[in-house]
Amino acid sequence: MNALIQAEALTINRPDSAITVLDRVDFRISPGEIVTVVGPNGSGKSSLVRALLGHMPLAGGRVARRAGLRIGYVPQKVHVDTAIPMNVRRFLSLPRRVSDAEAEAALARTGVPGLGRRPLTQLSGGQFQRVLLARALLADPHLLVLDEPTQGLDQPGIVAFYQLIEEVRRQTGAAVLMVSHDLLVVMRSSDRVICLNGHVCCEGTPEHVSNAPEYRALFGAEAQGMLALYRHHHDHDHDGTVSGHVHGPGCDHDHGHA
Amino acid sequence: MLDDFFTRAILAGLGLALVAGPLGCFVVWRRMAYFGDSTAHAAILGVALALAFDISIYAGTLAVAVVMAVTVAALVSRGQAMDTMLGVLSHSALAFGLVAISFVPGARSDLSGYLFGDILAVGRSDLVLIWGGAALVLAVLMIRWQRLLTSSLNEELAMAVGIDPRVERLVLSLALAVVVALAIRVVGSLLISAMLIVPAAAARGWAGSPERMAAGAASIAAASVGLGLWTSLRLDSPAGPTIVTVAAIFFVASQILRRH
Ligand SMILES: Nc1ncnc2c1ncn2[C@@H]1O[C@H](COP(=O)(O)OP(=O)(O)OP(=O)(O)O)[C@@H](O)[C@H]1O
Ligand SMILES: [Mg+2]
């Protein structure tokens, strides 16, 4: 198997219920690839990521991860209890102990040098996000899985972040699976984009996706910006929708969520 | 030297303190205080069963504590509203145990010994069990330290590196059951959770790392045992409660000193 992770007909229900969150999603990520998942809030992006990592039970379908796959994961939300005295340096050594030099290099790389002695619970949102990324990089991953990694980052931070991701891929050959709302940047820095809304609405190269009617229907305003960016002229009409969400041909199944 | 009841008491208390400190840190970190309570209170039921079937008190309390710990751990995994559930379990376990023990002939008179411990009556075989059990639990905690810590900090981050949080939770539950069984002679059922939580809470204020907090909790627990036993001899107060009182004083001191 060449793919790092491959999933077929992945179906997920909401915990303890029969309400479908994700319906028959096929997915595949190859070494060195940058894949970004976009979609509105509640569309099942985080659920997809967690199912691919094996963190949540499947209601149907299959997920195969390459044997010995090392994953660096930055979840969307990481709650750390103040009851545990834990500074950044110690955190970077969980669960694999790393040397001081490695730790400091990782922090410098993600733009927070010298933060090692700061307690985890006394970091700002953006600082914490960078520390999480540093820890993910220290795992020397084959695959980086980042769920909204730029939340809380300042504007230059976001730009620097995507540069860093591409740099990491260049240097280590790691693949990147990312969830993001930064549509403009996503389109510039991904190899493949998956547009999700309870199922895969459309997927493919950024050019293909930004031109797809399903994508435009989901992200009206911003999609316009994308169009300007890519100078695609569009001949679809998407003003007449009632639900605020239309499907293209081949995307005509209903959603499991209200 | 072991012929002296006071020496045996000190040794038993120290053995318990060394393991209760670090294990208590996990109880504090994971906010499992009520979890400790329910397991400890269930131990009284174990005492009743042990007396009724004429088996060792340690075996009886261990068995019931294990059942309770595993039940509670399973409930926690299912994410139920735990506060109320644990409160119900904890207090019913105690009430059940007290009722059960009242049916065992002759046990009623020893009741306070099981509720508050009878450290001055510790014998040589108790010492062997306490130190053996404590060493076992400490070894498990040390070997699994990084995994336990990662999974206590954040379960999603743990899962991403292949740690199963359910396994770590079970390990901690079983360790807790063992320590509860060991502690029944030393501080008794009602004060076991105090020995777990109070020293760890006192150490929290000072500690900059999980390791220092664990070591600090063990030291504070050990100091409480020493000072508490000495005080109980001088004042002729009950040993178990006096030990916990000293630990509580350490806690208050740590809170006051922390602010300045
Ligand atoms: N712990 C949970 N319990 C019950 N339902 C949940 C839980 N987590 C997510 N859901 C439901 O699953 C659906 C998908 O959620 P998910 O977190 O995957 O969305 P998302 O695309 O990541 O959204 P966002 O952009 O807000 O992060 C939502 O309808 C949500 O209500
Ligand atoms: Mg999400």
Image (cartoon, coloured by chain):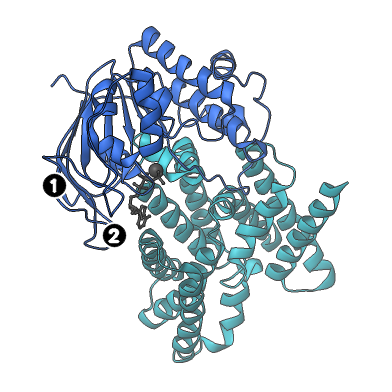
Q: Position of residue A191 (x, y in %)?
A: 29, 18
Rendering colour (chain A): blue
Please name the residue that numbered disc 1 is placed on: A252
Residue name at image x 27 percent, y 62 percent:
A16
Q: Position of residue B200 (x, y in %)?
A: 65, 52
Q: Chain of mark 1?
A: A
Residue name at image x 62 percent, y 50 percent:
B21
Residue name at image x 74 percent, y 59 percent:
B247
How busy is the neighbourhood of tag 1: few (under 14 within 10 Å), some, or many (20 plus)?
few
The quadrant holding residue A243 is bottom left
- Label 1 within 8 A of ligand 1 by Cβ: no
Residue A258 disc label: 2
**Distance of mark 1 from mark 2, alpha carbons?**
16 Å
Taking depth in this image into account, of B199 and A83 the one nearest to the observer is: A83
Determine the secondary structure under disc 2: loop
Left or right for B217, reference A166: right
Rendering colour (chain B): cyan
Q: Position of residue A59 (x, y in %)?
A: 18, 52
